[in-house]
Amino acid sequence: DIQMTQSPSSLSASVGDRVTITCRASQSISSFLNWYQQKPGKAPKLLIYTASSLQSGVPSRFSGSGSGTDFTLTISSLQPGDFATYYCQQSYSTPPTFGGGTKVEIK
Amino acid sequence: QVQLQESGPGLVKPSETLSLTCTVSGGSISSSYWSWIRQPPGKGLEWIGYIYYSGRTNYNPSLKSRVTISVDTSKNQFSLKLSSVTAADTAVYYCATSITGTTLHYWGQGTLVTVSS
């Protein structure tokens, strides 16, 4: 299985801050990388697919980049509703695997 | 937009079989891939497997010996069976849909299944 490693595991930030989360794959996955947002007690929600494509309805302050083994999720200006846990997931091969998550908390 | 809803027992005894159903509304199950994912309390996400509407399946090798996913197109439902459960199978179980099989576009709200005697 392809291992996905996220960093940091948690971070504290303020409304308006620029936030960057990184994800590294244990082997090259081309651009087959997705990002999900999960709020407490809710299901994950797809934000970005194939590394940089924004899912319909997702605000443009979210962006993704990267290819190969290293990827980044950026929130350009953190909003109150963005405090959540974010997961990366590789869709290059089965089984699809997830990173351990990054919890974004209010500073 | 398609909506998914999981249903099934919230408590299963050790060594028994966990059975869940996902009902699809707002779209036909006769297209796309239909997946199950689980999340132990306070932990990360684990993909269990998917079924294509035609019946073709793909399971996580770590669970393959215990998992069966099936589809009932007449009811617009698909189901999960996980046999010989232990406490380690306690988790929130989600169903989800995918165009590609491995990118999970829409999810159900999830259902907590506890394995305990």
Image (tube, grey):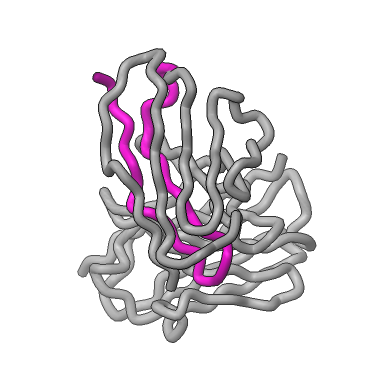
Query: In the rendering, at what x and y percent does residue B86 appear?
Result: 26, 74
Question: Which quarter of the figure is the N terminus of chain B placed in?
Answer: top right
Whether residue B29 is visible = yes
Above or below residue A71? Residue A79 is above
- Left or right for B56, reference B43: right
Residue lying furthest left:
B117
Would you say residue A14 sits in the magenta stretch? no
Is residue B92 visible to us here? no
Residue A73 x, y percent position in the rendering:
47, 38
Question: Which residue is found at the position 51% from the left and 44% from the top?
Answer: A35
Residue A53 quadrant: top right
Rendered position, A94 above or below A62 = below
Nearest the viewer among B57 and A65 is: A65
Residue B52: image location, x then y, percent: 69, 69
Give the magenta part as a residue range.
A79-107
Vertical relation: A62 (above or below) B19: above
Quarter placement of the C terminus of chain B: bottom left
Q: Measuring from the top left, give residue B10's x and y in whole percent.
A: 36, 57
Question: What residue sits 39% from the left and 38% below the top?
Answer: A21
Q: Is residue A99 magenta?
A: yes
The number of numbered badges drawn on the structure is 0
On screen, residue B63 versus residue B96, left or right, reads left
Asked which quadrant contains residue B96, the reply is bottom right
**Nearer to me, A41 or A64:** A64
Using residue B111 as the reference point, say whether residue B42 is left or right of it.
Answer: left
Asked which quadrant contains residue B74, the reply is bottom right
Residue at 60% x, 25% y: name it.
A60
Q: Residue furthest top?
A: A16
Q: Is residue B66 left or right of residue B56?
A: left
